[in-house]
Amino acid sequence: MVGDLEKSSFSNIEQQSLEFVKYTLDPWVVRWEQALQKALLLPSEKRAYFVKFNVDGLLRGDYASRMNGYAVARQNGWMSANDIRELEDMNRIPAELGGDLYLVNGNMTRLADAGAFAGQNNAETEGSKVEQITKTKTGSPLLELDTKR
């Protein structure tokens, strides 16, 4: 990696920064972690503790990419608002305000409640006559439904 920036744009400068962390810093970081682990921890402590440098801040992509990734994670239920806020170095939302909820798409319901309402609709309407009539401007019915057979 020569670092020639003569024909550079924002995207390839960002890529160069990521490559610098991956190919230049990462081997050194691993060596430092291993040396600190060996020098500072007793053999009994090594089972419970480890040394790890956090280089996530250096590996952050651009703002739009991070936000899109967080949106996917949040909507698919594998990150809470507080998980995302922690990665962005923001204060936590109190748990009672929903900061630790894991939601799934479907108008953002709680993961524990996903599918809970599907059985309720069938149980309430089963055995009773449900009739829905939608009328046009002229007053003639467009649709009539009857669940009782």
Image (tube, grey):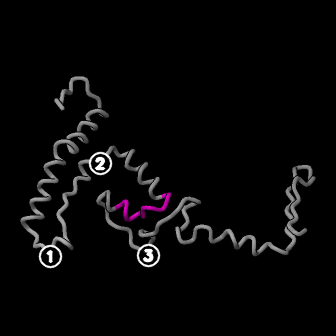
SS at mark 2 in the image? loop
Image position of 4 (left or right of 144): left
Q: Position of residue 74 (x, y in %)?
A: 46, 58
Mark 2 crowdedness (10 Å alpha carbons): few <14, some 14-19, many ≥20: some
Q: Quadrant of the N terminus?
A: top left
- CA gap, disc 1 to disc 3? 39 Å
Locate the C terminus by quadrant: bottom right
| SS label for mark 1 | loop
Quarter location, residue 44: bottom left
Depth-wise, is mark 1 or mark 3 nearer the camera? 1
Residue occupying the point 52% across, 68% down = 111
Which residue does the image show at 44% across and 72% down from the upper left?
A: 97
Q: Which residue is mark 3?
A: 96
- Location of residue 109 (image quadrant): bottom right
Residue 90 shown in magenta: no
Looking at the picture, does residue 140 appear above or below residue 8? below
User: Does 105 sit above or below residue 122?
Assistant: above
Q: Residues within 10 Å of mark 1 (few under 14, many from 20)?
A: few
Q: Which mark is residue 44?
A: 1
Instruction: Check if residue 84 falls in the magenta segment.
Output: yes
- Amino acid found under the numbered disc labelled 3: Glu
Q: Are marks 1 and 2 in contact (CB under 8 Å)?
A: no
Name the residue tied to disc 2: 60
**Spot occupied by residue 85 in the image (x, y as percentages of width and height):** 35, 61
Residue 114's place in the image compared with 24, above or below, is: below
Where residue 6 sits: x, y (%)? 21, 23
Which residue occupies the foreground of this view, 72 or 135?
Answer: 72
Of 27 and 113, which appears nearest the observer? 27
Q: Which residues are magenta?
A: 75-85
| Dot placed on the residue nearer the N-terminal end, 1 or 3 | 1
